[in-house]
Image (cartoon, rainbow, N blue to C red):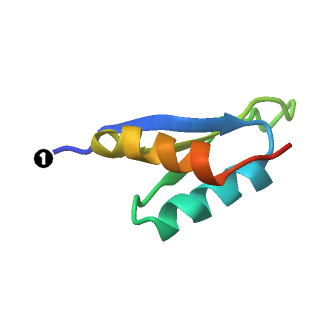
Amino acid sequence: MRKVWQKVFEDTSVHRAEIVKAILESEGFNPVIVDLKDSSYHFGKFEVRVNSIYVMEALKVIEKEINFE
């Protein structure tokens, strides 16, 4: 069966994306970070993605565990 990756978080900060990835990894979701920053102009974002079957659970973990304010 082919994995379909879906975005559960995006930010312009790689550090925030890494924090989200680490928390999701600790919950067993095996997330990946996709770097969508333009290398020439240094703008864009980073996305954290998980297998589509885990999207709802991952979003709940992010909502419960992560607050960057």
Q: Up-down: is 30 above or below 17?
A: below
Find disc 1 in the rendering and name its residue. Answer: 1
Corner quadrant of residue 23: bottom right
**Residue 9 vs residue 27, the one in the foreground:** 27
Q: Up-down: is 56 above or below 17?
A: above
Report x, y in % for residue 67: 75, 47
**Residue 58 vs residue 63, the one in the foreground:** 63
Report x, y in % for residue 61: 52, 50
Q: Is residue 44 left or right of residue 62?
A: right
Q: Residue furthest left?
A: 1
* Number of other residues with Cα within 10 Å of mark 1, as a class: few under 14, some 14 to 19, many 20 or more: few
Corner quadrant of residue 29: bottom left
Q: Is residue 43 left or right of residue 22?
A: right
**Residue 66 vs residue 15, the one in the foreground:** 66
Q: Up-down: is 5 above or below 65?
A: above
- Residue sitting at x 78%, y 55%: 15
Report x, y in % for residue 44: 76, 29
Report x, y in % for residue 18: 68, 58
Kind of residue at badge 1: Met
Image quadrant where one finds the C terminus = top right
